[in-house]
Amino acid sequence: MFLYKKIIKNGYVIQNSQPEHAKQLEGLQRKVFPTLSNSEIMTAAHYLKHIQVFPEGQFVVLDGEKVIGMSSTMRYHLSYEPHTFLEISDNLWIEGTHEPNGDWLYGLDVGVDPDYRSQGIAREIYRARQEVARHFGLKGQITVGMMNGYGKVEDEFTVEEYFDKLMNRDLIDPTVSAQQKLGFKIISLITDYLDDPTCGNAGVLMTMEATHEV
């Protein structure tokens, strides 16, 4: 088994999630994604299943014993077909969609406690995911970024128009643009990906090759 543990800035520790973190992970999900539909919030039971199905791909960032960051992933293939968050995650359980021989690492989420942001924690999480991709000889990471800036301009643009402006770099989105800076490349828009008005229910399919240094 590939185990990951690293001390990062300010003495925080990033490591693979353990069963004792499950309850805190659920709490952090609710704090990080306050407008996400309750049916799409991962619970402690979901996190326990993720650890069982693909332990190498689950991460926490710890300040002492406090969970301040998280990420859930699974192995998958690169598909350009439209899908929803619940479909791709097997209704959040990943047991039925994780592909043990999949050649990409599909990142289902990344979250950092709002009280700990702007410290490079998200970058460390993506870096750890790159290490997992390389260890297993995968092609890289897939993610579907939430256009979290859309809700503020929804009266001005449709989701499609907002996405086009993102593609043309005519605007900066707090999530998708940050992911681009880390090395993700935009592939396509996925409408009705999840139930969250902040991003107009849409997501941006992106990939990062395993050779890229985060």
Image (cartoon, rainbow, N blue to C red):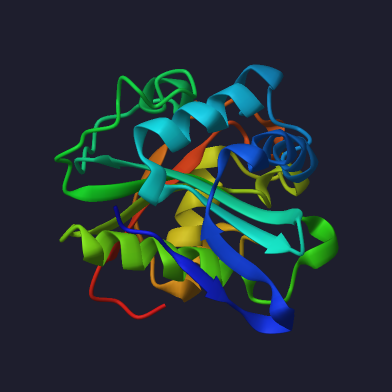
The structure residue drawn at horizontal position 55% and vertical position 44%, both measured from the top left corner, is 18
Image coords of residue 28 (percent x, y): 74, 43
Q: Is residue 43 visible?
A: no
Q: Is residue 184 left or right of residue 20?
A: left
Q: Height in image: 102 above or below 110?
A: above
Q: How many marks?
A: 0
Q: Residue furthest right?
A: 115
**Looking at the rendering, in which quadrant would you find the C terminus?**
bottom left
The structure residue drawn at horizontal position 31% and vertical position 58%, both measured from the top left corner, is 2
The structure residue drawn at horizontal position 47% and vertical position 65%, both measured from the top left corner, is 126
Q: Is residue 54 visible?
A: yes
Q: Height in image: 144 above or below 11?
A: above
Q: Height in image: 149 above or below 169?
A: above
> Relative to the observer, which residue lies in front, 115 or 147?
115
Image coords of residue 157 (percent x, y): 63, 44
Q: Is residue 103 left or right of residue 85?
A: left
Q: Is residue 80 left or right of residue 9?
A: left
The structure residue drawn at horizontal position 21% and vertical position 38%, both measured from the top left corner, is 79
Image coords of residue 53 (percent x, y): 36, 32
Q: Is residue 58 left or right of residue 209?
A: right
> Relative to the observer, which residue lies in front, 52 or 213?
52
Q: Height in image: 156 above or below 172?
A: above
Residue 190 sits in which quadrant? top left
